[in-house]
Amino acid sequence: MEVSYAAKAFATIEFVRHLARHPIGLDVCSMGELLTAERAEFRPDRLTLHGAGKTDEELQAACGGRVGSIVVDGLEELERLAAISRAASARCARVILRLNVGIETETHAFVRTGGDDTKFGIHARDETAALAMLRANPQLGFAGLHGHVGSQIPEPSAYVANAAVLLGAAERFAQAGMRTERLVIGGGFRVKTHPDDGGESLDVEQTLGAVRTYVVNRARERGLPVPRLGIEPGRAIVARAGTTLYRVLAVKRQTHRTFVVADGGIAENPRPALYGARHLVVTATPASGDDAEMTLCGRSCENDELGTVRLPRGVRAGDLLAMCATGAYTYSMAGNYNRFPRPAVVGISDGAPRLLARRESLDDVLRNDLGLEAQAK
Ligand SMILES: *Cc1c(COP(=O)(O)O)cnc(C)c1O
């Protein structure tokens, strides 16, 4: 099993440097993520370039030896890559085709990326054209097939279904003389972040066992070489490692609800507003009284609720709260709405804290603004 961590879940240079010491690859989907990997001295051959729409600069990076593999997300992109690789002097990254596997899982439609009406991947009708383009461009080394069905998937069966569609394509590719060495079944393993959420986290070991058995059996049955399996977990690796600390700025008892206003919100943690993400919140400093239901919100000029929480009635301004399991897609999605600086990130290993990203300063927030020159004159 080849594991490639999806950098978009969380990446800083120090964290990627830590990953580089392990037998794991890294999926990057922007120049920023690629540069992070390079500054962390991550081995280029273990990097995979992703993205639903890639820029010329990114395709040139793939043709310039900066990544080992590229997951091509469309026919047009394959054509552009072919053209750039013809002009390039370095060896082009190995090509993995992302297929729109069209899987209608019974799972969360709102985070699905593999249904046949999403923007991701190559549509089945374009498969033959993609094959022809690869054969006409031998400088593009074909490495395998890819399908990613979505995020927060609780069902092992979705991964087996995905592998089945990919293997079907691998069979057609084999008939055309193209060997699928790698079969990448994506990430999206569900991580439960609130005890009241139904169900459990996806059992990754069991899921991968089921996929492996299916792939080995079916490949043998059809006389195909067994491809190497690949996964791309993001959340499953970092979600539980992260905790967000909030300082309570105000507690307001309104007609029906008690609002706890924290020194964060939609700017540094957009996920609750974006797709109703829920996290367990506990007090990190002592507070008296029995627990009561309260609404935790941020201090943006929005109704930016971070969740319905149970906290001691005595909670008040100055207290610290801990929001659990925010390691994935929180810091990486943070922005500067309301011109709030982004928070710092501290990594803790064997009890020893270490700063991974410093707190943004107000100068950082203003650094792209022009206009101060006029004042100086
Ligand atoms: C985001 C993404 C992943 C990781 O998803 P998680 O839910 O964090 O595991 C894997 N593969 C692709 C193609 C992605 O876009």
Image (tube, rainbow, N blue to C red):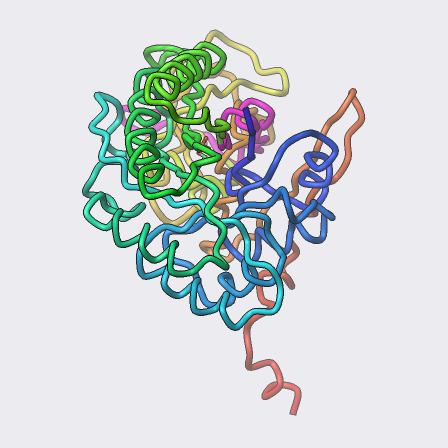
**Residue at image point 36% right, 50% down:** 73
**Residue at image point 49% right, 12% down:** 205
**Residue at image point 22% right, 43% down:** 124
Residue 96 shown in magenta: no
Residue 209 in percent (x, y) is at 46, 12
User: Is the residue 60 above or below the residue 333 in the image?
Assistant: below
Left or right side of 184 for 354: right
State the extent of the magenta-drawn residues as a range: 232-258
Q: Quadrant of the N terminus?
A: top right
**Residue at image point 34% right, 10% down:** 199
Residue 160 in percent (x, y) is at 33, 19
User: Is the residue 79 above or below the residue 227 in the image?
Assistant: below
Quadrant for ligand 1 reads top left
Q: Is residue 202 visible?
A: no
Residue 243 shown in magenta: yes
In depth, the one of 40 and 172 nearer the eye is 172
Residue sticking out furthest to the bottom? 377
Q: Quadrant of the C terminus?
A: bottom right
Q: Quadrant location of residue 241? A: top right
